[in-house]
Image: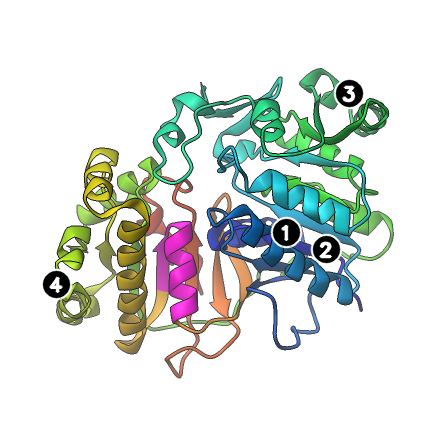
Amino acid sequence: MALLLGCIADDFTGGTDLAGMLVKAGMRTVQMIGVPKAPLPDDIDAVVIALKSRTIAPASAVAESLEALRWLRAEGCRQVYFKYCSTFDSTPRGNIGPVAEALMAALDSCFSIACPAFPANGRTIYKGHLFVGDVPLSESGMSRHPLTPMTDSNLVRVLQAQVKGKVGLVEQSTVAKGEAAIRERYAVLQNEGCNLAVVDAICDADLMDIGAACADLPLVTAGSGIALGLPQNFRRLGLLGDNPIADALPATGGLRAVVAGSCSVATQAQVAVMRAQHPSFKIEPLELARGGDLVSAALAWAALHIEAGPVLIYATDNAESIKDVQAQLGVEKASSLVEKALAAIAIGLVRLGVGKLIVAGGETSGAVVQALGINGLRIGPEIDPGVPWTTAITEVPSDKPLALALKSGNFGTADFFLKAWGKLA
């Protein structure tokens, strides 16, 4: 049977976030790390191809996304979903706009939406402005993001700066009237020459109606929230049944560890909570730059502590410290040093017997799964909104199943690292 929904995510944790939402809505889903090179399991309804394209050059992001699209089309996917972060992480040059326009052109589509709303995680859109909790995006911690500082909460303006076509808006007053009104607004905007439309959403009911109104669009661009509203479209066509165990995973054992590279405010709080209760080891970028072998040191330390319970190895720090490191090393070098070190540590932890591993941060998660040689993940139960447990469906440096939770830096409650283990069999 052809895949129903084919998704392209611009980072790894974002892909996992989306896949988790689809599973929650009853679609059996796998996440592939990059364009698949081997056949997928034959019992799935949706696939998410996770790229590492959020912060690379726009031309490279477009090329990688189009390669993923070619694979999805060859598999007969009925609809394509371009997934980005719920905080619309991007810069004036892209990459959300350029990728969206390239995918539309390849699909011969003249219209799509842009809707990063995810109310369950405090991301809402009103009159085109993105809010994080109770504050506009530009006043949130994302305004100080080291790679994609978001200093404008007006998504119409942000997206318009990235695209050649015209960007419109579907306001909350229209969304509140339901699917038919949303479709009518899409038609009006297309007649006005709009190619993309930012869509307001302040609650899950909005996402359901927006998803229903997108049933006929070849391409949907959004955060993971819209995933709530898309599976129902396939059910209406008789293509998708009800599956109460779409999130079932094989039982996993082994030791437990957390590797944290994100410096988001949410991850800082999670690291602080775990450090108060479990052993922790900090990776210092400046020490790595001086040639210090922190990988060996961290693994030797872990070997002494991990049998007693979960351990934390982290590079997470506050914004001021990160800026100081970046000023000395440069943004790219600082990030690369930390990612490589944490990825090598993850390999070592698995070899020590870790079978349940949490990774915090999109870039860190990407580096870890690549280092472990993981090409795909089967999506399991949700820990917090947007963050499920997964199991690797390819070989890793272990003879036992490996469970992974790949957490976006911005997601999860402060006790996320403590409560996650209870969600696994």
Q: Position of residue 270 (x, y in %)?
A: 29, 43
Q: Nearer the viewer, residue 32 or 229?
A: 32
Q: Tell me the kind of residue under disc 3.
A: Lys
Mark in the foreground, 4 or 2: 4
- Do the CB atoms of the residues marked 1 and 2 lie less than 8 Å apart? yes
Q: Provide the residue span drawn in magenta.
A: 357-371
Image vertical order of residue 46 relative to residue 37, above or below: above
Q: Tell me the tag on residue 342.
A: none
- Residue shown at 50% from the left, 47% from the top: 54
Sequence-earlier tag: 1 or 4: 1
Mark in the foreground, 1 or 2: 2
Image vertical order of residue 11 relative to residue 369, above or below: above
Q: Position of residue 52 (x, y in %)?
A: 49, 55
Q: Tell me the kind of residue under disc 2.
A: Leu
Give how far apart the Cα atoms at labels 4 and 3 are: 60 Å
Give how far apart the Cα atoms at labels 3 and 1 are: 25 Å
Q: Position of residue 321 (x, y in %)?
A: 19, 38
Image vertical order of residue 240 relative to residue 90, above or below: below
Relative placement, left or right, of 279 versus 47 is left
Q: Tell me the kind of residue under disc 1.
A: Leu
Sequence-earlier tag: 1 or 2: 2
Q: Circle 2 is placed at which residue position?
A: 5
Q: Circle 3 is placed at which residue position?
A: 177
Q: Position of residue 368 (x, y in %)?
A: 38, 64
- Do the CB atoms of the residues marked 4 and 2 lie less than 8 Å apart? no
- Do the CB atoms of the residues marked 1 and 4 lie less than 8 Å apart? no
Sequence-earlier tag: 4 or 2: 2
Q: Say how many tags the image has.
A: 4
Give how far apart the Cα atoms at labels 2 and 3 are: 27 Å
